[in-house]
């Protein structure tokens, strides 16, 4: 009887660990999504990823250890120490304290800092007119195209390059190499997938992670996989790659509600069309007005000086005539500067 109980327990254990059915495309995440546009929000994440990021640009290679969090419902990401090397992943310096980076589901990146000089929490960003749906369909189409090419016998397929010796993964990995296409042209993509991971994850986006993470094919007949290694290489040899070390369930909250939006906000980037073109047009208009006001002030000052010379040393009539005009022009110039800074969320930086 004891042996029978032990055998039953053993098979129940195996069924829960080794023979559990995998998660397929239709089995979606139930975790609440984060805000798509509101950057001063409270953000929640349900998985932690530990990985290594490496990139090569202009002949220099840099490598960083990353810990970040993902939302399996909308694909948004939170990097407590940032993702850009601009701050060298420093927590703080003499000018600011770095509090983290959120990558929204529409792929708008927001850096959260504490501005020490002005004693102000700021969310530094570039406004994006993309939507979460744009990102979803873009990723899904790219993934489908990549794997469809893998199955196309008419194409010449390169063998994937060997995994770096630093990749340490217990599962059996399957490598793929092909090409992806973007605004900067063609790039070579290499993926190594664990197609039968021991843990199974429910997600609602094509890729939950930065370059590695959970891959959802949205195919009822195909299991989700883990991207354990991913490398994107440009024609000139520059590349970026991520090596997955671990992915585990862990909830994380980042409260951004007290951070003041700052940067190229929608006042400059617009809400429709090409944001860069909108910004360039508005900056050109600002520059033209600033130059016109500068010329006006200079002309008024010259006219005042000439007036004083013709009055032979009696400045009173000239001051009375030109000082109010110069004061008004300077006030208009200051107001123009204030309006630009306000559109950037930086009006508090302007000294009175």
Image (tube, grey):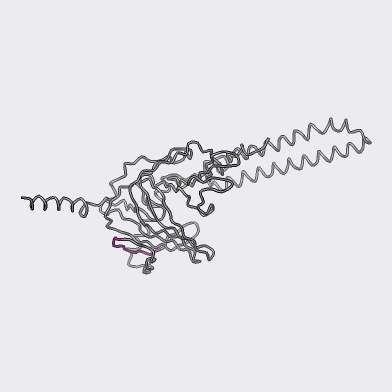
Q: Main secondary structure of the magenta part?
A: strand
Asked where in the image residue 351 lies, by quadrant, the reply is: top right
Residue in the foreground of this view, choosing between 82 and 211: 82
Farthest-out residue, front: 2
Q: Residue furthest right?
A: 312
Q: Quadrant of residue 162?
A: bottom left
Say left or right for 195 vs 86. left
Q: Is residue 75 above or below residue 259?
A: below
The reply to whether the magenta stretch includes residue 173 is yes
The one nearer the camera, 123 or 113, is: 113
Left or right: 152, with 264 as reference point: left
Residue 347 rendering spot, x and y as whole percentages: 61, 37
Left or right: 196, with 109 as reference point: left
Q: Is residue 289 above or below residue 224?
A: above
Out of 199 and 271, give the one closest to the viewer.
Answer: 199
How many marks are shown on the rendered structure?
A: 0
Question: Quarter of the image containing the C terminus?
Answer: top right
Determine whether 138 is above or below 152 in the image: above
- At 78% across and 35% down in the image, what residue appears? 326
Range of magenta residues:
170-178
Q: Quadrant of residue 188?
A: bottom left
Q: Is residue 17 magenta?
A: no
Where is residue 168? Give x, y as percent.
35, 62
Query: Where residue 297 appears, x then y in whole percent?
Result: 77, 39
Coordinates of residue 221 in the picture (x, y in percent): 25, 53
Q: Nearer the viewer, residue 141 or 323?
A: 323
């Amino acid at each position: 009887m004891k042996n029978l109980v032990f055998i039953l327990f053993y098979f129940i254990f195996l069924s829960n660990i080794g023979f559990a059915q995998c998660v397929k495309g239709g089995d979606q995440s139930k975790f609440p999504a984060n805000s798509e546009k509101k950057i001063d929000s409270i953000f929640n994440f349900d998985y932690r990823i530990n990985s290594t990021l490496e990139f090569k640009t202009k002949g220099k290679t840099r490598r960083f250890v990353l810990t970040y969090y993902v939302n399996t419902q909308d694909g948004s990401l939170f990097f407590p120490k940032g993702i850009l090397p601009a701050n060298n992943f420093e927590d703080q310096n003499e000018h600011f304290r770095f509090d983290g980076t959120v990558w929204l589901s529409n792929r708008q990146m927001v850096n959260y800092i504490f501005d020490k000089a002005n004693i102000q929490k700021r969310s530094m960003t570039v406004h994006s007119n993309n939507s979460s749906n744009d990102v979803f369909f873009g990723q899904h189409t790219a993934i489908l195209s990549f794997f469809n090419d893998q199955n196309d016998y008419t194409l010449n397929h390169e063998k994937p390059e060997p995994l770096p010796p630093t990749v340490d993964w217990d599962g059996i990995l399957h490598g793929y190499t092909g090409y992806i296409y973007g605004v900067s042209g063609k790039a070579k993509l290499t993926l190594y997938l664990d197609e039968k991971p021991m843990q199974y994850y429910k997600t609602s986006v094509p890729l939950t992670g930065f370059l590695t993470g959970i891959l959802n094919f949205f195919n009822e007949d195909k299991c989700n996989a883990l991207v354990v290694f991913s490398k994107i290489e440009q024609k000139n040899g520059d590349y970026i790659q991520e090596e997955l070390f671990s992915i585990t369930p862990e909830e994380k909250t980042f409260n951004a509600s007290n951070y003041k939006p700052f940067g190229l906000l929608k006042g400059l980037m617009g809400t429709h069309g090409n944001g860069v073109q909108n910004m360039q047009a508005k900056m050109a208009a600002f520059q033209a007005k600033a130059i016109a006001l500068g010329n006006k002030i200079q002309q008024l000052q010259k006219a005042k000086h000439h007036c004083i010379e013709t009055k032979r040393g009696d400045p009173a009539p000239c001051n009375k005539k030109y000082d109010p005009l110069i004061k008004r022009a300077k006030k208009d110039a200051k107001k123009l500067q204030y309006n630009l800074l306000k559109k950037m969320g930086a009006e508090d930086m302007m000294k009175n």
